[in-house]
Image (tube, rainbow, N blue to C red):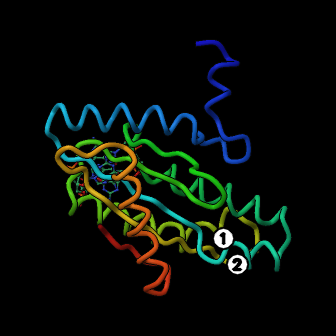
Amino acid sequence: QSEFESLAFVDGLTGLHNRRWLDQAFRRQVERGQRDGKPLAVLMLDIDRFKLFNDTHGHLAGDRALRAVAMTLNENIRPGDLLARFGGEEFALLLPDTALEPALSIAERLRRAVANQTSHHMAGLPAMSISIGEAQLRVGDTFEPLLERADDALYAAKTAGRDCVRWA
Ligand code: C2E
Ligand code: C2E
């Protein structure tokens, strides 16, 4: 793969994989999960009150916050886990071979890591928090409904007061 091709799959701001990469990589994992009949978890993660943070501290601080959260998430997962920036202040994580219970404890670990570690990456800015929605692959599932359920669960986490984990 040429450097140009691989850069097309990287988010310039955070250095994470981008949406275009996610579409391909997640689809492949979903197909594999269906074939193998193994569990698979998708997490949607969204920074809480990001717009307010941007309006209060400015867009450069907002960029730093996005990078700090991306770095924190990336440091707290395994190399085989698939993390990408989904867009805006939202990230997506696919955990191959992972059932509900471990997926929820991973989500909780990530939530806590962001609450505790991001300010350390941001030199004096207030700590960020994230809300997380989790969904499990179901028989006959495809990429879109799986992500939609994770996104619905994320919405439930927001409605429940943010800085928490919910599942579909
Ligand atoms: P890694 O596999 O890339 O994991 C990065 C970080 O994700 C870990 O940093 C930890 O914060 C989190 N993490 C990953 N898997 C788990 C888990 O099952 N439970 C919990 N509570 N956290 C997890 P950490 O702990 O500093 O480890 C750094 C590296 O050391 C890991 O990188 C891995 O390569 C290795 N490692 C640490 N503990 C173990 C272990 O029990 N078994 C194996 N095979 N490797 C380990
Ligand atoms: P745990 O932290 O309670 O994790 C339980 C199981 O959840 C793990 O079983 C693994 O199947 C899954 N899991 C947890 N974190 C991650 C993750 O970041 N990515 C993925 N893909 N899966 C994850 P496993 O592998 O048998 O590990 C058993 C225990 O060993 C873990 O219990 C933890 O206490 C320790 N451990 C394993 N690897 C690491 C590591 O890299 N860092 C740390 N700190 N602990 C680890």
Q: With 6 as the anchor, is 133 left or right in this view?
A: left
Q: Residue at x 34, y 62 (%)?
A: 134
Q: Amino acid at mark 1?
A: Ser
Q: Residue at x 80, y 66 (%)?
A: 61
| Front-most of residues 76 and 32 | 32
In which quarter of the view is residue 82 placed? top left
User: Residue 154 appears at what percent x and percent y?
Assistant: 44, 69
Q: With 91 as the anchor, is 35 left or right in this view?
A: left
User: Residue 101 appears at what percent x and percent y?
Assistant: 21, 63
- Identify the residue position indicated by label 2 in the image: 126
Q: Residue furthest bottom?
A: 161
Q: Residue at x 61, y 31 (%)?
A: 9
Kindly indicate whether the residue at mark 2 contacts the one at mark 1 (C-beta within 8 angstroms): yes
Which image quarter holds the C terminus? bottom left
Q: Amino acid at mark 2?
A: Pro
Q: Residue furthest top?
A: 2
Q: Residue at x 57, y 42 (%)?
A: 19
User: Residue 123 appears at what percent x and percent y?
Assistant: 76, 68
**Secondary structure at numbered mark 2:** loop
Q: Is residue 155 above or below residue 87?
A: below
User: Residue 91 appears at what percent x and percent y?
Assistant: 54, 55
Q: How far apart in space, not on screen, are marks 1 and 2 (Cα)?
A: 6 Å
Q: Residue furthest left?
A: 37
In which quarter of the view is residue 4 placed? top right
Q: With 76 as the anchor, is 65 left or right in this view?
A: right
**Secondary structure at numbered mark 1:** helix
Which image quarter holds the N terminus? top right
Q: With 97 as the anchor, is 135 left or right in this view?
A: right
Q: Is residue 68 above or below residue 77?
A: below
- Identify the residue position indicated by label 1 in the image: 119
